[in-house]
Amino acid sequence: MRKILICLVAALLPLTAAAEQHGTAEAEVRAAVVAYNGAYASNDVEGYFAYYVADATVYFYGARQDVAAYHDEWVAMIEGGGGVETYDLSDVQVRMLAGGDAAIANYFVEYRIRNADESVSEGRAFETDIWQKIDGAWRVVGLHYSDIAGQQ
């Protein structure tokens, strides 16, 4: 009986270590999600885009977007007097993927954006980000953003 208990404990120890590692990685991803969206909300264009890999797959407003073109659009909007006025996250959920170096985060967003032409866009959306730990930093490798119909 004692040998069985020792074997059982030995078998479960790696699972405990893996759970602790996933817990730490999940906390890192949550912090990255908050910082990434905080940069967006404060109109920190370079800080926000620093989270993207250059070839990230991003989808919003009904089409895939090129990250470099998206960056240029944001620079032009900020330089033209536009910007984010509010960008509030809720119900943030993070799911770690096998190996602990990738994660999926999704959440709701309530936003108000002032466009360069002084018009205002506001509404509610749902965003899903795919994060990967690259060279020790969590980076966005994929994003899907959808406005929630009837809540703009």
Image: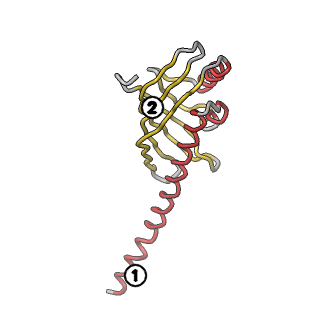
**Which disc number belongs to residue 103?**
none
Judged from the image, the secondary structure of the residue bearing numbered disc 1 is helix
Q: Does 30 sit above or below residue 19?
A: above
Q: CA distance from mark 1 to mark 2?
A: 52 Å
- The reply, left or right, for residue 78 in relation to residue 119 is right
Residue 16 figure quarter:
bottom left
- The reply, left or right, for residue 59 in relation to residue 72 is left
Residue under pointer 1 = 6
The quarter in which the C terminus is drawn is: top left
Question: Disc 1 or 2, which lies upstream in sequence?
Answer: 1
**Would you call the spot at circle 1 few (<14 residues within 10 Å), some (14-19), or many (20 or more)?**
few
Q: Tell me where residue 76 appears, x and y as whole percent.
A: 65, 18
Residue under pointer 2 = 110
Q: Nearer the viewer, residue 54 or 20?
A: 20
Q: Tell me where residue 59 appears, x and y as whole percent.
A: 48, 26
Judged from the image, the secondary structure of the residue bearing numbered disc 2 is strand
- Name which residue type carries label 1: Ile
Q: Tell me where residue 10 appears, x and y as whole percent.
A: 43, 76
Residue at 61% x, 38% y is: 51
Q: Tell me where residue 8 appears, x and y as whole percent.
A: 37, 76
The quarter in which the N terminus is drawn is: bottom left
Q: Which marked residue is nearer to the observer: mark 1 or mark 2?
A: 2
Residue 83 figure quarter:
top right
Q: Nearer the viewer, residue 98 or 151?
A: 151
- Name which residue type carries label 2: Glu
Residue at 58% x, 45% y is: 138
